[in-house]
């Protein structure tokens, strides 16, 4: 395996190509623009790859819906207000169970906010549609994970037929880093949802309430079955922990380093990091909270991860948190917070 | 020396010298992360690059305190004051006004002059950054572009700064 010096954008695009993606539909928006420009760069060299820069995110999203129905591995990438616009198509994909893949580069909000970083699009990624939020959402914390989870997102989308999101941010995407990518990964093949000359009614609208109710029950059964196979997490130094920090994405990486520093000073601290925010690894969290009921949430939002944790918990736990919407959280800051609040 | 923060106004070439330093360290088998940070402006806003170079793998690309800080403008100074610690080495363009004038460093080559200054500091740190390696890369990147002679002279002028 070759040592390379790559940005997160470049790694994400490599993962899409290795996953077998052939088309990208997108509209540029910081900090996700370079996914589109890097993909375009690859299309110049590889004639099997196609792209279309659409007039907005709504058009990009519906183009993905159409292309996946024709059996093309397709994706889009967006950020912030673009993720808001993308909900229209994503919600259709929720209803029609389309293998819709979207890379979301979180930026500060609300509205245009700031252009590089936040963890404020968790709710939007999971619950942005006018439905029940049955989506597969991965949250990578390192460049290698960005690669792995992009591959898994394509596989999950095409295997389980739920819209699937790689939820990342401008820090991870813009960071250029030395990496040795492990690219050895099997692909789930794409196939047309409707074959040529075939008539098939894939619905996103119903005239009878009870009919939709039955369909949603089926979706829920499928989602719960998928959860058993894909819900994923990292538990780091939690065996004897007296406090467990819960963090995701790049904040999870900072927390891991903070745990090591705190352990050196004798604090029994661990990390629980959900790799899938949806489905959430609820069983693992509850098992952990049973022997360590002191949880500290660390996130670059005002509590979007905390709400997922509270929803997942069936055992009682004391929850505190370091909530810093739209700004990065440094290792030293996490260390200080734990030292000050957990004597 | 692990945490390096480069700052200036957009258009001053901060991202270019970050790219050069990181590439040289990467070629020397160091672990490297580099994360640019800037606002909405294409030019004129504060442009930052957070660099970490280490023998050990790096888990998080940002940091709270810089070991080495380059400041190329007044607004960059204001923006980066929060990253200055007790042991931070600060290279501030305001302290080099006379030298830049004497060495006749043109405005467009000031980033390359400071690349020379940074190289002098970093060469002592054993993190793979050497004058020769930086010059070779600089030559590969810029020698066919306009203003190469000025850039080369500016780099060499930066190398001659005594920062002890």
Image (cartoon, coloured by chain):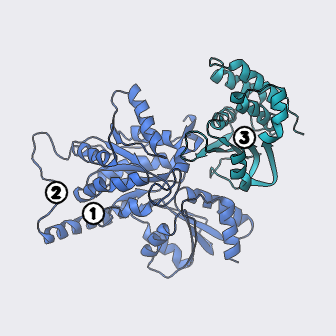
Compared with A186, A316 (above or below) is below
Total numbered badges shown on the rendered structure: 3
Residue of label 2: A203
Residue nearer the viewer, B47 or B4: B47
Eye-nearest disc, 2 or 1: 2
Mark 1, secondary structure of its residue: helix
> Do marks 2 and 3 both belong to one polypeptide chain?
no
Residue A160 seen in this snapshot? no
**Depth check, front residue: A243 or B82:** B82
State the residue position of label 3.
Answer: B72
Name the residue tied to disc 1.
A222
Q: Position of residue B27 (x, y in %)?
A: 67, 32
Q: Picture coordinates of residue A133 (x, y %)?
A: 33, 64
- Say which colour chain A has: blue
Structural distance between the alpha carbons of marks 2 and 1: 17 Å
Q: Chain B is drawn in which colour?
A: cyan
Taking A138 as reference, is B147 above or below it?
above
**Marks 2/3: CA distance?**
59 Å
């Amino acid at each position: 395996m070759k040592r390379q010096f790559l940005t997160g954008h470049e790694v994400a695009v490599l993962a899409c190509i290795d996953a077998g993606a052939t088309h990208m539909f997108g509209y540029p928006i910081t900090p996700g623009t370079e996914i589109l420009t890097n993909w375009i760069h690859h299309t110049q060299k590889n004639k099997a790859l196609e792209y279309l820069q659409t007039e907005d995110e709504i058009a990009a999203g519906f183009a993905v819906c159409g292309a996946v129905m024709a059996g093309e591995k397709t994706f889009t990438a967006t950020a912030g207000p673009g993720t808001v616009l993308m909900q229209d198509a994503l919600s259709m994909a929720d209803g029609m169970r389309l293998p819709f893949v979207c890379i979301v580069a979180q930026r500060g909000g609300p509205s245009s906010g700031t252009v590089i970083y936040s963890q404020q699009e968790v709710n939007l990624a999971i619950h942005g549609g006018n439905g029940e939020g049955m989506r597969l959402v991965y949250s990578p914390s390192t460049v290698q994970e960005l690669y792995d989870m992009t591959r898994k997102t394509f596989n999950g989308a095409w295997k389980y037929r739920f819209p699937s999101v790689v939820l990342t941010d401008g820090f991870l995407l813009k960071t250029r880093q030395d990496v040795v990518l492990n690219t050895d990964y099997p692909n789930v093949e794409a196939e047309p949802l409707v074959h040529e000359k075939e008539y098939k009614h894939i619905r996103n609208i119903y005239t009878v309430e009870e009919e939709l109710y039955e369909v949603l029950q089926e979706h829920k059964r499928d989602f719960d079955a998928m959860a058993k196979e894909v819900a994923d997490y990292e538990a780091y130094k939690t065996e004897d922990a007296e406090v467990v920090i819960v963090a995701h994405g790049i904040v999870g990486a900072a927390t891991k380093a903070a745990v090591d520093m705190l352990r050196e000073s004798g604090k029994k601290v661990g990390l629980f990091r959900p790799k899938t925010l949806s489905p959430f690894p609820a069983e693992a969290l509850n098992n952990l909270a049973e022997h360590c009921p002191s949880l500290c949430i660390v996130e670059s939002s005002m509590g979007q991860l905390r709400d997922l944790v509270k929803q997942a918990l069936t055992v009682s736990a004391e929850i505190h948190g370091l909530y810093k919407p739209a700004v990065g959280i440094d290792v030293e800051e996490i260390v200080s917070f734990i030292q000050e609040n957990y004597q | 020396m692990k945490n390096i923060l480069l700052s200036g106004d957009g258009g001053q070439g901060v991202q270019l010298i970050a790219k050069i330093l990181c590439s040289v360290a990467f070629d020397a088998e160091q672990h490297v992360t580099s994360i640019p940070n800037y606002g909405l402006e294409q030019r004129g806003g504060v442009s930052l690059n957070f660099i970490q170079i280490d023998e050990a793998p790096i888990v998080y690309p940002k940091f709270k305190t810089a070991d080495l800080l380059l400041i190329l403008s007044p607004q960059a100074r204001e923006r980066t004051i929060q990253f200055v610690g007790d042991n931070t080495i600060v290279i501030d363009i305001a302290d080099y006004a006379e030298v830049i004038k004497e060495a006749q460093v043109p405005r467009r080559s000031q980033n390359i002059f400071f690349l020379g200054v940074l190289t002098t500091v970093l060469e002592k740190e054993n993190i793979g950054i050497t004058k020769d390696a930086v010059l070779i890369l600089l030559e590969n990147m810029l020698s066919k572009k306009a203003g190469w002679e000025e850039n080369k002279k500016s780099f060499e002028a930066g190398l001659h700064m005594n920062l002890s």
